Image (spheres, grey):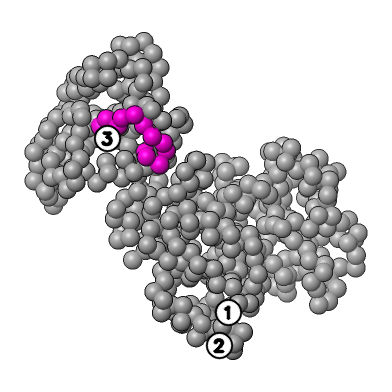
């Protein structure tokens, strides 16, 4: 893959996550009923960072879960990708406001699968979606509640998100398949 | 995404396949702990359990695994089948295949039956046990049980005790354990061993006392006194003396070691009543854990096999 443009650097990402943390507190009038679920793989460190920001501001402890949606995909029959990431939601979600976090929002199918997975765990009060990047091209009626950056892309481009916890660097770039 | 279309022998799987199955089993094990134990993954897939030999554990384990993945599984047992009416096995299989199924899980009393069947059908096949030949899914769940108790396979000392001659479990287990780098010792008597022991590439002792203090894993096999055409052992007492696990021997086992058995256990024969009654108090007693792990591993297998195109 060829890198075309650098969209966000480390500082941009940090500011975005701080802003989103404040938006979440504002919209939920605090953080008492919030729980976090990060979508594997890169939604997880993002969820952790946002939760930490809110914990510092609100002086409390927030629960964070990890969700792998491989078994809920809608393309399972055609080409199954082996599941390697763990799903770990060690808390009750009934009546909670779930902050669902992913790195890139594209067709919306991953989020659809996540909603199905979460509903199997219980009945949350609300599910609110945080994405670092919204790159357009939705194929289902799905939208994010909190968006880091809107990046218009062509269908054959890729948005590559790298995070320190996994890739040793914080960076978002647009790439083209060669 | 496995390198093989059918799983007939444990040798059909590459080391990469085995590691992939182990990883996936972890994800499915997590699902078993949920309150809502269902995944939509294999909706619309049809699986047939074709058991020509009676079995409750293995059959139920596969059935639960399939249903947890939302696949449709139908049980077909030989006693109620058209075989009684004289239909040949091939015709039976072709009839079933014509019902547009996705996966066949089969158990048969004849060694080699699977290879014969696989050559005559298009549908992928999982061997749930054929005669004395192989029981690959048992070996995989045994490996997974070991993986959850120890960090690495390499160098682990395993003793497999009992009737190796008649055991498809032993044949699959020993091959698999050796392939993953474990040190295997067969504990048995000459009349319970197959002719060429070199096939197993393992150590051999006739008395369980000789290895009981050194091993990390003690795997007990089922000894069937009642179902024997010839006498393999003079008496149960003599079997107990050399090949069984009792409380005294259990106490000699080293810290962190585990005990396994494919089930069902013959109390008083290969494992004493005392050990079976107090087994759950001992953290190394993995016989029940194996059953739970079996569902997770079979879910992983069915998932990986129905994904290969």
Q: Secondary structure at mark 3?
A: strand
Q: Earlier in the sequence, mark 2 or mark 1?
A: 1
Q: Residue furthest bottom?
A: B86
- In the displayed structure, A38 sits above or below B125; it is above
**In-front residue for pair A174/B158:** A174
Point out the stretch of residues depicted in magenta.
A118-129
Residue at left 57%, top 54%? Answer: B294
Give left or right: position of A174 versus A116: left
- Cα separation between marks 2 and 1: 9 Å
Is the C-beta separation of discs 2 and 1 under 8 Å? Answer: yes
| Chain that bears disc 1 | B
- In the displayed structure, A4 sits above or below B167; it is above
The residue wearing badge 3 is A102
The residue wearing badge 2 is B87
- Cα separation between marks 1 and 3: 52 Å
Q: How many marks?
A: 3
Using the image, tell me which numbered label, if any, was put on residue B222. Answer: none
Counting from the top left corner in percent of width and height, residue B228 is at: 80, 73
Counting from the top left corner in percent of width and height, residue B90 is at: 51, 84
- Cα separation between marks 3 and 2: 56 Å
Q: Secondary structure at mark 1?
A: loop
3 or 2: mark nearer the eye: 2
Is the C-beta separation of discs 1 and 3 under 8 Å? Answer: no
Which image quarter: residue A79?
bottom left
The residue wearing badge 1 is B81
Which image quarter: residue B60?
bottom right
Residue A27 colored magenta? no
Within 10 angstroms of label 1, few (less than 14), some, or many (20 or more) residues? some
């Amino acid at each position: 893959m060829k890198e075309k443009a650098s969209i966000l650097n480390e500082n941009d990402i940090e500011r975005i996550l701080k802003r989103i943390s404040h938006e979440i507190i504002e919209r939920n009038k605090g953080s008492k009923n919030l729980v976090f679920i990060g979508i594997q793989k890169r939604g997880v460190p993002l969820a952790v960072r946002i939760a930490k920001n809110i914990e510092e501001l609100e002086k409390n402890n927030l629960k964070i879960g990890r969700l792998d949606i491989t078994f809920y995909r809608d393309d399972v029959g055609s080409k199954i990708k082996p599941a390697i990431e763990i799903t770990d939601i060690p808390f009750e979600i009934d009546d909670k406001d779930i902050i669902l976090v992913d790195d890139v929002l594209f067709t919306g199918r991953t989020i659809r699968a996540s909603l199905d997975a979460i509903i199997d765990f219980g009945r949350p009060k609300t599910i609110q979606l945080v994405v670092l990047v919204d790159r357009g091209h939705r194929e289902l009626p799905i939208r994010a509640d909190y968006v880091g950056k809107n990046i218009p892309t062509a269908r054959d481009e890729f948005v590559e998100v790298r995070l320190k916890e996994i890739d040793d660097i914080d960076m978002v770039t647009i790439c083209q398949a060669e | 995404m496995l390198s093989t279309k059918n799983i007939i022998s444990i040798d059909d799987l590459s080391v990469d396949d085995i590691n992939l199955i182990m990883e996936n089993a972890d994800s499915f094990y997590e699902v078993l702990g949920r309150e809502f134990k269902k995944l939509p993954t294999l909706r619309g897939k049809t699986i047939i359990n074709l058991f020509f030999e009676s079995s409750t554990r293995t059959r139920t384990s596969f059935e639960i695994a399939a249903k947890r993945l939302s696949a449709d599984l139908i049980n077909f047992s030989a006693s109620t089948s058209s075989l009684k009416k004289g239909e040949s096995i091939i015709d039976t299989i072709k009839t079933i295949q014509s019902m547009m199924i996705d996966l066949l899980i089969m158990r048969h009393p004849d060694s080699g039956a699977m290879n014969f069947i696989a050559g005559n059908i298009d549908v992928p096949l999982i061997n749930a046990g054929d005669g004395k030949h192989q029981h690959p899914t048992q070996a995989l769940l045994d490996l997974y049980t070991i993986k959850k108790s120890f960090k690495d396979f390499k160098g682990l000392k395993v003793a497999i005790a009992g009737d190796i001659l008649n055991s498809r479990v032993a044949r699959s287990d020993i091959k698999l354990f050796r392939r993953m780098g474990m040190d295997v010792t067969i504990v048995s008597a000459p009349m319970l061993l197959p002719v060429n022991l070199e096939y197993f590439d393992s150590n051999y002792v006739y008395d369980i006392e000789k290895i009981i203090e050194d091993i990390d894993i003690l795997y007990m096999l089922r000894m069937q006194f009642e179902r024997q055409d010839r006498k393999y052992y003079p008496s149960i007492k003599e079997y107990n003396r050399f090949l069984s696990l009792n409380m005294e021997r259990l106490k000699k086992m080293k810290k962190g070691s585990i005990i396994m058995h494919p089930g069902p256990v013959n109390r008083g024969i290969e494992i004493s009543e005392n050990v079976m009654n107090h087994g759950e108090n001992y953290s190394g007693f993995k016989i029940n854990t194996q059953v739970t792990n079996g569902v997770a591993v079979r879910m992983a297998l069915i998932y990986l096999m129905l994904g290969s195109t």
